[in-house]
Amino acid sequence: MNIFKELVHRQMTEAVSTLQRYCRQPSIAAQHVGIEETVQIVQDMITTVGGQTKVLDDCGGNPVIYAEFSAGINGNPNKTLLFYNHYDVQPPEPLNEWTKPPFGAEIHDGKLYARGAADNKGDLTVRLQAISILQENGGLPCNVKFLIEGEEEIGSPSLPRYLEKYADLFQADACIWEFGHKNADEHVEMVAGIKGMCYLQLWCHGADIDLHSSNGAIVDNAAWRLVQALATLKDGDNRILVDGFYDDVAALSPELIQMAEERPFNRKQFSEQVGLLRPLICGDENPNFHLWYAPTMTICGLESGYTGEGSKTVLPRRAQAKLDCRLVPNQDPDDITAKVRKHLDTHGFTDVEVSQINGEHAYRSDINHPFVGMVVETARQAYETEVVLSPNSAGTGPMYPFGEYLGLDFPIVSTGCGWWNSRAHAPDESIRIADFEQAMLHMVLLMREFGESA
Amino acid sequence: MNIFKELVHRQMTEAVSTLQRYCRQPSIAAQHVGIEETVQIVQDMITTVGGQTKVLDDCGGNPVIYAEFSAGINGNPNKTLLFYNHYDVQPPEPLNEWTKPPFGAEIHDGKLYARGAADNKGDLTVRLQAISILQENGGLPCNVKFLIEGEEEIGSPSLPRYLEKYADLFQADACIWEFGHKNADEHVEMVAGIKGMCYLQLWCHGADIDLHSSNGAIVDNAAWRLVQALATLKDGDNRILVDGFYDDVAALSPELIQMAEERPFNRKQFSEQVGLLRPLICGDENPNFHLWYAPTMTICGLESGYTGEGSKTVLPRRAQAKLDCRLVPNQDPDDITAKVRKHLDTHGFTDVEVSQINGEHAYRSDINHPFVGMVVETARQAYETEVVLSPNSAGTGPMYPFGEYLGLDFPIVSTGCGWWNSRAHAPDESIRIADFEQAMLHMVLLMREFGESA
């Protein structure tokens, strides 16, 4: 292993410069920014390290990039590892809260700051650079494929169509998913599944124009209606009140329950890190239990009327809310949307519009699959620290269609180069250069191990 | 009267051009825009028509402009009429909903479009031009004073201090207030009082940074807390639930009740004009009763997290709401603020911050005062249409300190050049040139009548 540690270290200058180029190109799916340019950069990154690439764009949405690397002369041509990544990023707003330019990819104190550095441009770079190292040092130990999509941050609406149409092209024996990080104890965390999502937009319209707020004496206020409607969806104890919301939640095996109960969670550290002003909402229960297994309903955005400095006496003509429901296995996003619609109707809010902006099913790999153990074991070697596997992430990704089209027992593990303060989706997103290097070594060791496995 | 009708008509070219110059200068108190420049323009407008002016700026806030015109040789030196106006305007946002430039003062189809045209730059221009006409045609029939402030749209926080300090300077026998308009029946509406206001800002903070929304499983969401807190303030029938909110509401005389019950209100016309999507919230009761006498609590603004296009999966670190409570006589804005604070505490929302952005008491003149009748009668002559007086406006203004410092039985009537679709505080604010001309004639006739009164 030491030789590869050294080889990875020598690769760092090129790797960091490649990552900087990639991060400096905005690629914001929600705002239709920079998609075409980014596809070109990713293709260049693949061909530079000897891969074949194909841009798939015949199923709508932003293009999906397919890449292929064949096992070397000494490698195993019967084993194929699939990497899943995405080239799109979250919007950088609020811009005034960044202390570094969001698309500057500047390096300060051993960290590279950029929107997308952690989620998920660092990891694609790690994987391609690991392939490059292996190719130049004995050849690839297995076949490698990539699926790199451009709509992950808006819920991967087109991905299932590409997976269905190109299921043969993407066939593989196992998959490494996009993300992973070190926690505040500097232990490597990885997951073998994800939560689903039902992202809703609610609109309430009251009038054609904004009115003088003195009309509040007689005019029904769109903002008040939206507030009243939202307040019926969740109680003060954060229990979701939508009728039937919890009906399809899959039962948990004793093994899964035990994993959650036994996994330490440092409440104090978590709260201090993000500056929480109130206690966690899970009471005395292990927060992991909620992060892994509890469906959620989060207000991601609220907007109505005047929100600038000082006062404006306006009765707003409309109000909107964005709601993110994280789902667990067996919950169906379309079904949840229908239940929210029905709930609002039942409570007299037929005028409040609901639309699903995106929906994804949850996915959980079999945590006893040998591939899962292999990813964990090689990570221990590469990172030389404790490795913690969770049955699924609190976050979301389009794993479900991979299972649906590539095999329902398809093992997927997510691991990557983030750290505990990477601030994915928030201002000052960053990765640490040292983690980036270790993640690269992990991928080198994993591909070697995978090629040698039965 | 015909001679003055003709004289007013001849004055129109100069009057409109003066108004355009005035409207083209933004003067947004809430955003600290253009105050100094506007003060200079207003002084020019006064001295151009022969007035003496003094800028009062020793009690904080934006300057108050005092102006004085003495009765002519044939006028009555023992009668003084005070005009109250303000040179500040509401913010023009949302800018993309204007079909004309908000500070262009363009004239289309007989209307002049500008932020502030109706509220309240048109009326100051009307009054100064009326003075000019009288001075050039027999002299001023009475003394005239002006108080022109620059913080009306942010709740006149400094005005009471100026009125207290300069009470002698502003002494007068009666006051014409800033605004008035023709309703959809083309009848002239005026008021002899105003509602008070308690404008509150509510903040809820959850963390130091925005979080990935997957943390919604364990982190208390500032936006949800704000929604839950707001929902406790008002019920689904628009009854304000803050304990003691209605306690101090002054009892209504039978005459006031009768006025409200007998005054027609065209619900269909009102709803169609602004494109209301739901019925009025006053049920079968006369809407005037609510507009004049019911205290309100209106959400003027809501903001949290991501409100742009598409989805962003963020758990916002904070949320804010702006609440406008319109008050009736005897309600005290500071007392209302304290009651809202106490209500939130009682309901477990001690963490939701409340601050009063501005507060004003309501004011109602004695509607049987002779001056009130004189304003109505001269309006009938000038406008040649029906004139409708209401005991008070649904809107707010700083009348209360006028009563407090100039005499508690001080008669104040508000009348002006707006029309039923002036859209004060909304995009495409406008006045009609024909109304502007009639309003000028009204002021000419009123000053003549006032000078001759006992």
Image (cartoon, coloured by chain):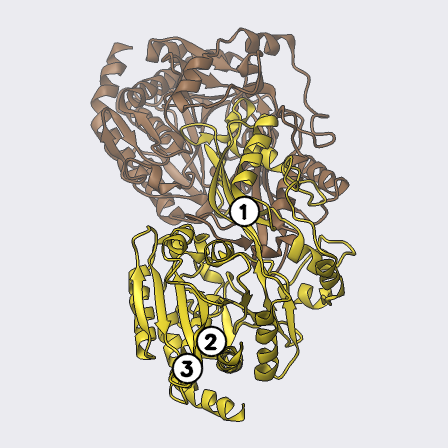
Chain colours: A brown, B yellow
Q: Can residue A165 be seen in this view?
A: no
Please state which amino acid type lies under the numbered disc 1.
Answer: Cys
Contact, mark 3 vs mark 2 (Cβ under 8 Å) = no
Please state which amino acid type lies under the numbered disc 2.
Answer: Leu
- Residue at the spot 59% in from the left edge and 7% down from the top edge: A258
Residue A422, how many percent across, how many down? 37, 26
Residue A60, how many percent across, how many down? 53, 48
Q: Please identify the quadrant where the N terminus of chain A is shown.
A: top left
In-front residue for pair A110/A205:
A205
Query: Secondary structure beneath disc 3?
Result: loop
Mark 3, residue position: B140
Left or right: B159, with B420 as reference point: left
| Crowd band around label 2 with a 10 angstrom C-alpha radius: few (<14), some (14–19), many (20+) | many
Query: Secondary structure beneath disc 1?
Result: loop
Mark 1, residue position: A59
Give the foreground label among 3 and 2: 3
The numbered disc on residue B287 is none
Given the image, what chain letter belongs to the residue carrying mark 2? B
In-front residue for pair A102/A402:
A102
Given the image, what chain letter belongs to the residue carrying mark 3? B
Please state which amino acid type lies under the numbered disc 3.
Answer: Leu
Are the numbered discs 1 and 3 placed on the same chain, yes or no?
no
Q: Is residue B354 visible?
A: yes
Mark 2, residue position: B112
Residue B133, how many percent across, how many down? 41, 85
Estimate the spatial distance between the alpha carbons at disc 2 and disc 1, rounded to whole Å.
52 Å
Left or right: A81, with B296 as reference point: left
